[in-house]
Image (cartoon, rainbow, N blue to C red):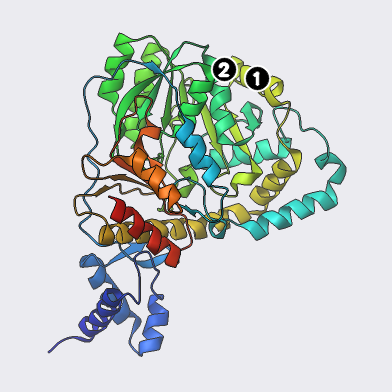
Amino acid sequence: MESLYHRVAADLAQRIGSGAYLPGDRLPGVRTHARAHRISVSTAVTAYQALVDRGLLEARPRSGFYVRARQGAQPIEAARPAQAAPPRLVTGQAMAMALIKAANDPAIVQLGAAVPDASFLPTQAISRALNQVMRTQRARAAGYMMPPGAPELCRQIARRMGESGSSVPPEDIVITAGCQEALSLALRAVTKPGDIVAVESPTFYGLLHVLESLGLEALEIPADADDGIALDALSFALDRWSVKACVVSTNYSNPLGHCMSDNAKRGLVRLLGRRKVPLIEDDVYGDLGFARQRPSTCKGLAPDADILYCSSFSKTLAPGLRVGWVASSGPRRERVEYLKYVGSIASPTAPQLAVAELLGSGRYERYLREVRGQYASAVARMTDAIMKVFPEDTRISRPQGGFVLWLELPEGTDSFAMARRALREGVSIAPGPLFSASRRFGHCIRLSSARQWDARMDRALSTLARMI
């Protein structure tokens, strides 16, 4: 005779199969489910766990049970050559500018830019914080907040970094206009035009813009979606070329989504330290891991190493606030502060004070606990939708944080041509060559999952599938 929990599990599985619960959806809590179906909590827990064992659900600690994306997506298998290609100047980022401009067009389905939809952001909390600043600190908010920035914001950032394992004094922090400026200032602090900078491949195309603007040569080091930057290839490159800096996104990188292990992070720091090459650590997605515990940083694991740590609140609170920072020490920090002043004098004051208020009140942490699950659900739903309509041999990254997906399409796909055609049909995507100084990844694209799901999203993915 079939047990009760088997019948409960079968009913849930049927509803998942029919689409009543979609990938990424959170199921009712076990107590709620038990009351609604007049069963014991233990029966509900056993039924849920049975579906976890079958791969239909996943359990997230202190969050609940969620519908998993359908199994069967082929994982990314990035090439891992032992040797890096020669360094080269970065040029021709015109397609990226077209993509960025398309992000301002409400008629375009925005899958290309890694910018969260407003529905994922705490817009009401930000509005209240800004209003409070203008009521209580109007005169201060109207003036310059000279570098390094608002003292209370530097203190709050230092506190948060300390809680995640990076002991950084407030005086080592310089506030910037987002992470893009943070990366630019860090690079300017340790390089000069013509220098070689090691970067992951693929890497964030905004970083390539910065390298191009500074006249720096990019030395592409292969990375994969599981382990991140290939330390063996980096070691070879450091032996062969005079590298002046290395830029690495250690946690939930854009576009691959990998999170480096602590051992890999320590290995990276040791490798660069032996060659006296400064590390510029980009951790803009570090707060957006799907797990409850925040991952470590190289800055935290090696506090005495030559590391310039860059991050911002653009992916969490709001990109429009333009609040980021660089954490470094000694002459590095002094150089960053000077470059910030001569480049833009100061970052806007009111957003700095508002972010400090949000951090100090605890609202930022409460928001993160909620939005991590939303991003995990969005990634799962996008993955499932792609698997339904894209060719079977499409490979999809499996990020454990952030909200972007990297897709390897069938060989022969021209993602640049596809992106241009998609724009004409009202859909923006990021073609793979944007993420490489040498225009690799011609059959790859990056998609953003941080969108409100509606009929336009379904049509957009179907349009892309038809093009492929």
Mark toward the start of the polypeptide (2 vs 1):
2
Q: Please state if 202 lies on the left or on the right of 163 as rendered.
A: left
Comparing 240 with 389, the one in front is 389
- The residue carrying pointer 1 sits among few (fewer than 14), some (14 to 19) or many (20 or more) residues within 10 Å by Cα, namely some
Residue 327 locus on image (x, y percent): 57, 29
Residue 252 locus on image (x, y percent): 40, 42
Q: Give the alpha-carbon distance from disc 2 to disc 1, as whole Å.
A: 8 Å
Residue 25 locus on image (x, y percent): 39, 68
- Callout 1 amino acid: Leu
Q: Which residue shows up at 39% across the image and 46% down it? A: 421
Residue at the right extreme? Answer: 139
Q: Which residue shows up at 75% across the image and 28% down it? A: 146
Q: Quadrant of residue 444?
A: top left
Q: Quadrant of residue 466?
A: bottom left
Q: Which residue shows up at 72% across the image and 30% down it? A: 346
- The residue carrying pointer 2 sits among few (fewer than 14), some (14 to 19) or many (20 or more) residues within 10 Å by Cα, namely some
Q: Which mark is residue 189?
A: 2
Q: Is residue 338 above or below residue 359?
A: above
- Callout 2 amino acid: Ala
Q: Are marks 2 and 1 in contact (CB under 8 Å)?
A: yes
Q: Please state if 136 lies on the left or on the right of 21 as rendered.
A: right
Tell me if residue 428 can be seen: no
Q: Is residue 134 above or below residue 80?
A: below
